[in-house]
Image (tube, rainbow, N blue to C red):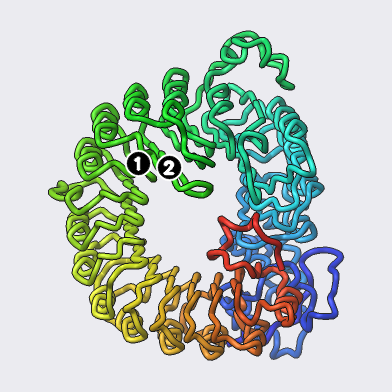
Amino acid sequence: RFGVTPLPTTPLFPHPQPSKHLPSPPRSRSGFARSPGLCWARRYPMEVAAKRGRGGGEAELIERLPESVLLEILAKLDLESLCSAAPVCRPFRLLVAQALSSFTVLDLSGFSPDSRILHGVLKDNKVVQSLTIDCRQLENSSVNIFARESLQDLVLLKGHLFSSQIFKEIGEMCPNIRLLMLEMLHRHDVESSNHCERNIAQMLEKCSYLEMLRIKFLGHYVNPDDLGLGTIRLKPPKTIKSLLLQPTSERHAKLLVQGSGAFRSSTRHVAELPIPFPPETVDFRLQSLSLVLNRITDGLLFSIVHNLHLLAELCLEDRPAEKPSLHHDLTNSGLQSLGSCSQLTRLSLTRSRLYCTVTFSRVNDMGLLLLAEDCRKLESIRLAGFSRVSDAGYASLLHSCKKLKRFEVVNSTFLSDLAFYNIDAPSSLVDVRLVSCSKLTSEAATSLASCRNLEVLDLSGCKSIDDCGLCSISTLGRLSVLNLGGADITDSGLSILGNSCSPITSLSLRNCKRVTDKGVASLLLGDGIIRTTLLTLDLGCLPGISDIAICTIAEACRRVEDLCIRYCYSITDASISVLGSIQEYRTERWPLRRLDLSYCNGLSADSIQLLCRPYFRGLRWLGIGSTTLSTRSNNGCVRINQDRPWINVCLNGCEIGCKDGWQFHGWV
């Protein structure tokens, strides 16, 4: 109960910038909310009571504890819990700073720190080895804050303000780095591709221990033939074992895997390259290769098979702008060539419809039969866009690859229940995703229920899955992720799932039109365990959902962190009030972290009051696109940002977290 009233605070970070818009002390601008699950007052109510009972002071009870005891306690807390404890008193602030200096692994991807907050967390830490940052608010100059010689793993996400200069600076300041992942917005109108490739080349020369490199350039439109990595002809160091490039082109991908021998074959190409290449052949030790390119062809696969003999993982996605010609496309011959990769355990071949509605029309069942015959060690398969492959091709993979754990098929016109007929009972399958396969029915779900080790099942877009299939699925004792988006299930089917013992942590019922408030109640108030295990719930596009269902969720689900109710037109301000005012401190209730209200037209402009403090104290992401809250005439978004600068407010209707859409819009 003591978490209801905010404690007097002292800022953790030096030189705070107070804001006239914040009624509370500037400590909250650090981005670490006084959430119910993290508030120190909730964790140590007796100490707070003792402090208040004395009428204030410097927390004498805490000061009497030995420093070694306090440090041992603080060492068991995560980053947010530490920073929530820091403002309680001066001794805690000093001890938290000391504890932060000893962290070797830091994950700051849960919110978007600015340079001041980042400096406060990292200023005394000289030993951090693994660092992950959401870089939405950071510029190139922030590299001086987080880069250091001790870093071995560096993951920089959502580099909205970065330029390619950051590659060069990372190479100079992080010489011992082994893993680098960087995703950034490519501004081709600001800097040329030649300048970008020079900066990457200089980084690679400095990072002699680099083993894993993942570079993603994102933008409004990326043409791999003339932008970004399409024109970057880089030479990875020999230490590289895992490489991801997005985007690139088929031509440059072939040159990459063929090594310097390909470049020597044409003096004209050598003269054009800004990066000098030695005359000897590059000895690639790549074990994992992931490329997003303009087209996948037989020639590319032939080059990969011929040059990368240690390859264990191959993930290729193409985004053609037009239908590939006969001699520049993937055929059965290309798939057959993969049989020469004796170490291959993971394969992903995807044709996207982003720019043009095309498929792998030159691959049929024979191609998959040849692949299954020669690649029996496969443990993970993902196939998307194979419009001419039927049950025979997919069944050959399921029966030939005895070690198969992950099986995913997307947009398959001819995949039906027959492909899963007579699956061996002791099947090794753990993760099955069958997305937008229109011919699948509940018979397929019944067959998959014989895979007793199944943990992930995604049947989104399979509209013929009904309550009978859900009844079979509910018998899976290890199922943790279930996606039934667009299925023909009803409230009766949810009642069966609500009485099951499946430890489901993530459930999607999006676009299940026949689900109503009664079904949500049957699901969460049944005799099963789902209400105690559920962390992520998607109820988007359900016309039968109203405030009653939201009240049920607030009452029954103690641990839900992600809640999506987009396109639920019957949701009103009452739902926001219920979700935001939950204050049951006698029980272990986890606060909402991400809430998607996009396209909920039943919300009024006044509901903005319910999204400000003291409500939703654990919130990190809020989606309010196409609602009255996002209109220009309503300054509520500005108020939320001023009141809680650590919350990412999305006005563009992105999915939760903006993981796939952050590059397309600005931020509040």
Q: Which residue is mark 1?
A: 380
Amino acid residing under circle 2: Thr
Quadrant of the rendering where the N terminus is positioned: bottom right
Q: Nearer the viewer, residue 635 or 427?
A: 635
Q: Secondary structure at mark 2?
A: strand
Q: In the figure, is residue 116 to the left or right of 410?
A: right
Q: Position of residue 114 (x, y in %)?
A: 76, 59
Residue 154 can be seen in this image: no
Q: Position of residue 378 (x, y in %)?
A: 31, 35
Q: Residue at x 21, y 35 (%)?
A: 400
Query: Nearer the observer, disc 2 or disc 1?
Result: 2
Q: Secondary structure at mark 1?
A: strand
Marks counted in the figure total 2
Q: Nearer the viewer, residue 163 or 169?
A: 163
Gap between marks 2 and 1, in whole Å? 14 Å
Q: Position of residue 609 (x, y in %)?
A: 67, 87
Q: Mark 2, residues whose alpha carbon is within 10 Å: few (<14), some, or many (≥20)?
A: many
Q: Which mark is residue 350?
A: 2
Q: Residue at x 61, y 88 (%)?
A: 604
